[in-house]
Amino acid sequence: MTADITDATTRSDDSGTGSEPPRQSFWVARGLIPGRGPRRTLALASFVRQIGNGLFMISAALFFTRSVGLSVTQVGLGTGVAALVGLLAGIPIGHVADRHGPRRIYLVTLIAEAIAMASLVLVHTFWLFMVVVALIQVAASSSEAARGPLIRGFAGPDPTRYRSYLRAIGNLAGGTSAIAAGVAVQMDTRGAYLALVLGNALSFAASAAVVSRLPFLPPVKSPLGTGRWIALKDTPFVVVTVLDGIMSIQGYVLVFALPLWIVDHSDAPKWLVGATALLNTGLVVVLQVRASRGIDSPSAAARAMPRAGLAFLIGMALIAATAGMPGWLATALIAAGVVVHTVGELWSSAASFELNFSLAPAHAQGQYSGLFGLGPGLASAGAPSVLGLLCITWGAPGWLVMGAVFVLVGLTMPRVVRWAERTRPTYQVPGET
């Protein structure tokens, strides 16, 4: 490849001027925050955005059922259909970001998210709910597709480490906003729920204001002879996307299956539901960046996936073993299972970031990000049904079956990644010889 995306990061380093400050603060020196410049600005925008998301996501189901007046079935159907509709926007918007520069497209998508989210205050019927939630999902999918090349452009020589940092602060933001959301849920009034909705809309607008401070990131020239929709024709990458999507079901094990298991299938105390969520969040905040070390190539990412799959199986086996156990022993095993599962989550997330960035050509980062987002998007739509059947209906054997699926995916990934590496094309950019 004759042109590389790191050209953009050379023009836009931490300081934004090509020089480092003579002395770094304690927080910068320890890697807790990026140095001054585009990376810190983008990190702040991400933190603000996730604060709002955390406010709303925790209370969304209650808002729709208790304030809007929809049934649980209607909410499930509407959000599922909206998620599928939203997936269609990622690839074309990512392509637009590639052609016109990701910063301006990301700004537009953030503003669209703010408007769509604020529109929820007007929802009183099921069909209007369907339309507005679909618009929210389209805007969110478009936003993620445009954000991918923006992160890659400013990330510097180690994009996986920076992306891991963004995930860590995202979890910190979500944990912080959970406190405010909990207060609103406890109040259980329409005014409190509307405050969360508008707070989320405001966070998107505030994030857009921060993003507007980023320097312009020019698009990478398209190589000669490339088609428009090259991501969809990249069969190895499509297979990697499918496998990563299956692996991403693990993200719903602790937030969907585990709470139901604790309450209905174990003698562990109910407060463990919140405690395990805090434990998982804390571990991600503290360890995600460290877990990304060494995962700096497609082959390294592929090697991390089998480890992640094995960790998921062990963690889920520990949780499954708690059926019929005394409460204190169930509590200990569930906590251990959450820790082991989270270790797998750290590895799989870092590997996913690396595969997303490194297998995509420089000139099509947005388009490839949009395609890669289809995997987690489909997992989000299907994970509750899959985990409900296996982990809750089938019980302990289902936990082991799901864990075995993760192991199988992890073992398959290295072979598919080697295939993808062998088939990466060499491009010639116009004007270069």
Image (cartoon, rainbow, N blue to C red):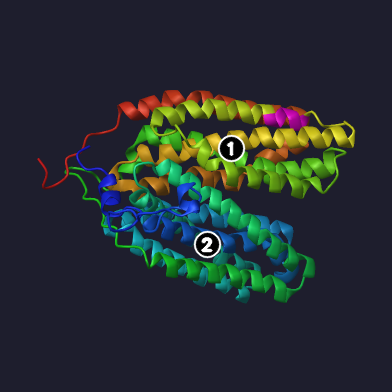
Q: Which residue is mark 1?
A: 345
Relative vertical location of residue 103 with respect to residue 368 in this rendering, above or below: below
Question: Which quarter of the rendered picture does the N terminus lie within?
Answer: top left
The residue located at (88%, 38%) in the rendering is: 267
Q: Judge by depth and name the residue closer to the eye, 188 or 165.
A: 165
The residue located at (58%, 25%) in the rendering is: 407
Residue 64 among magenta residues: no
Residue 393 quadrant: top right
Query: Which badge, 1 or 2, comes first in the chain's sequence?
Result: 2
The answer to whether residue 124 is seen in the rendering is no
Q: Secondary structure at mark 2?
A: helix
Amino acid beneath label 1 = Glu
Q: Secondary structure at mark 1?
A: helix
Question: Which quarter of the rendered picture does the C terminus lie within?
Answer: top left
The residue located at (65%, 34%) in the rendering is: 341
Report, in whole angstroms, how far the alpha carbon at label 1 lies from the one at label 2: 22 Å
The residue located at (46%, 48%) in the rendering is: 29
Q: Which residue is mark 2?
A: 49
Q: Position of residue 232 (x, y in %)?
A: 36, 42
Relative vertical location of residue 150 with respect to residue 382 in this rendering, above or below: below
Relative vertical location of residue 426 with respect to residue 76 in this rendering, above or below: above
Q: Judge by depth and name the residue closer to the eye, 80 or 350.
A: 350
Mark number for residue 183? none
The magenta segment: 315-320
